[in-house]
Amino acid sequence: MGRSSDVPALRNGLAVLRVLGGRAGPVSAATVARELDLPRSTTYHLLAELESAGFVAHLTDERRYGLGIAAFELGSAYLRHDPLERLAGPLLRKLVDRVGHTAHLGVLHGNESLYLIKERPARPETLVTEVGVRLPAHLTASGRAILAHLPAPHVRALFPTASAFVLRTDRGPRGLAELRRTLSAEHRLGWAVEDGMVTPGFASVAYPVFDHGGRPMAAISVTLRHHCPDETTVCGTNWPELAVDVQRTAAELTTRIGGQPAG
């Protein structure tokens, strides 16, 4: 058995990895020390140990540190075991049984929504959102549920030009300013709504799933038939009762994966 004195060092090492993993790019040792309130000597020792194990890469010319190949391999192993999908499957099945509509688990893949799981009711309706299908994230409820909790620079990087705003129908954000207004409104609402933007005659509501750092890592959505009286405009229905069920399921999945809601 390892010595009990090794436990704080292990915890500090994991904290270093979380700092590096939570940044968009490499950071300095001073930044790590400041964020974790550690002595610089301790920080450099931890970084050196993690570097020797392959979990940290030292960018000598920049005097900064980033995640190493071992961290990537560990993340890939996590994905291979499909824990998110395994935990989400039964929850989506219960959600479908409660609401009687099709439910999905989706993630961001660049600026697209990628569907990992689809659960159908006893009498399913034909949808384009099959497992493995990718759709423009700014059009889908699941995509915008995630985008609404990302920093503005991240969203801008995903949609750098007008060509990124493809449309499937005559509805949906047509530029970054309109997308930002939509995301802000849905962030205030508490969930995302898509009405006829993916397929005419269908609407969806979605709520994000958060990781241990309160970052959106996936979204759960429910899709139902809906026709606005005036098919040229969105009628503003947002299905609060259905959103409660979706939010409850997303919150339970967040808890099961050890995540925490965004502050």
Image (cartoon, grey):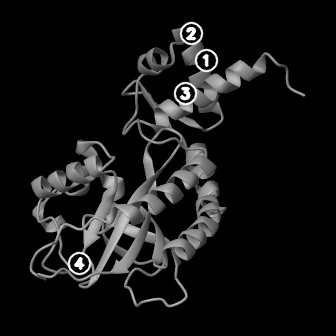
* Placement of 103 over or under 254, stated as above or below: below
- Residue 219 visible? The answer is no
At label 2, the amino acid type is Ser
Q: CA distance from mark 2 to mark 1?
A: 6 Å
Q: Position of residue 82 (x, y in %)?
A: 62, 63
Secondary element type, mark 3: helix
How busy is the neighbourhood of tag 2: few (under 14 within 10 Å), some, or many (20 plus)? Answer: few
Q: CA distance from mark 4 to mark 3?
A: 44 Å
Closest to the observer, 199 or 100? 100
Name the residue beneath numbered marker 1: 45
The answer to whether the residues at label 2 and label 1 have Cβ atoms under 8 Å apart is yes
Name the residue beneath numbered marker 2: 41
Mark found first going from the N terminus, 4 or 1: 1
* Placement of 216 over or under 65, stated as above or below: below
How busy is the neighbourhood of tag 1: few (under 14 within 10 Å), some, or many (20 plus)? Answer: few
Q: Position of residue 81 (x, y in %)?
A: 67, 61
Secondary element type, mark 2: helix
Mark found first going from the N terminus, 4 or 3: 3
Mark found first going from the N terminus, 3 or 2: 3
At label 3, the amino acid type is Val
In front of the other: label 1 or label 3?
A: 3
Closest to the observer, 11 or 170? 170
Name the residue beneath numbered marker 3: 16
Mark found first going from the N terminus, 4 or 2: 2
At label 1, the amino acid type is His
Name the residue beneath numbered marker 4: 196
